[in-house]
Amino acid sequence: MAALFAVLTLLALAIQTTASRWLPLSALVPDLVLVLAVDLGLRHRRALAPIMAFAMGYAMDSFSGSQLGVNTFVVTLTYLVAYEAGTHTSATGPEAGAVLAFIAVLIQSLGGFLISTQFRAPNQLGALLPAALLQATVTAVLAPPVFALVARCKRMLGLSQPRRGRGWASRGA
């Protein structure tokens, strides 16, 4: 599982860092690493998963982070929020994942801006908000196909396990 997410993270980073050259607006580049972190949080409950999320954020900082540690923090936080949402609610489908990815991109964009300006220009958040909303929307729209791709890769590699149902219906009652 760790090797699969390592390869997917490297592919996501390659797409993210080169797609800005292809697209007219950098806000159109989805944050695929955050989508992978959401998938990791919603569907993987092993002890290695938070370490993998941290490593994904660290790799993101290494490739494209202007403020060292911000991406590591946001990806790990995204994993933890997705983990809690998946553990304490029944919202583990692609729609819930898309919403979590949308929120994570907004937190990363706005939080990164506030940290880079050292909280001296909060009145300029209005200028950043349209681009952040656009990137969050693009990321949320692409999240379900990325979830499907991850699931397909896991099935191909034999990493999928049959899901056990929750509640009384799954216990044969």
Image (cartoon, rainbow, N blue to C red):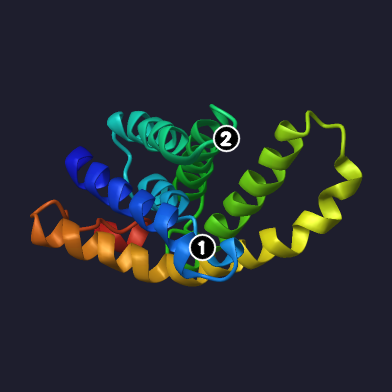
Tag 2, which secondary structure? loop
Q: Residue 42 or 107: which is nearer the viewer?
A: 107
**Residue 173 seen in render:** no
Residue at coordinates 24% horizontally, 62% vertically from top-left? 151
- Identify the residue at the far right of this view: 123
The image's mark for residue 29 is 1
Image quarter of the C terminus: bottom left
Percent across and percent down for residue 29 are 51, 62
Depicted 87 relative to depicted 146: above or below: above
Left or right, 56 with respect to 116, comes to left
The image quarter containing residue 162 is: bottom left
Percent across and percent down for residue 57 are 44, 36
Tag 1, which secondary structure? loop
- Mark 2 lies on residue: 66
Left or right, 125 with respect to 146, comes to right
Residue at coordinates 34% horizontally, 63% vertically from top-left? 147
Residue at coordinates 30% horizontally, 29% vertically from top-left? 47
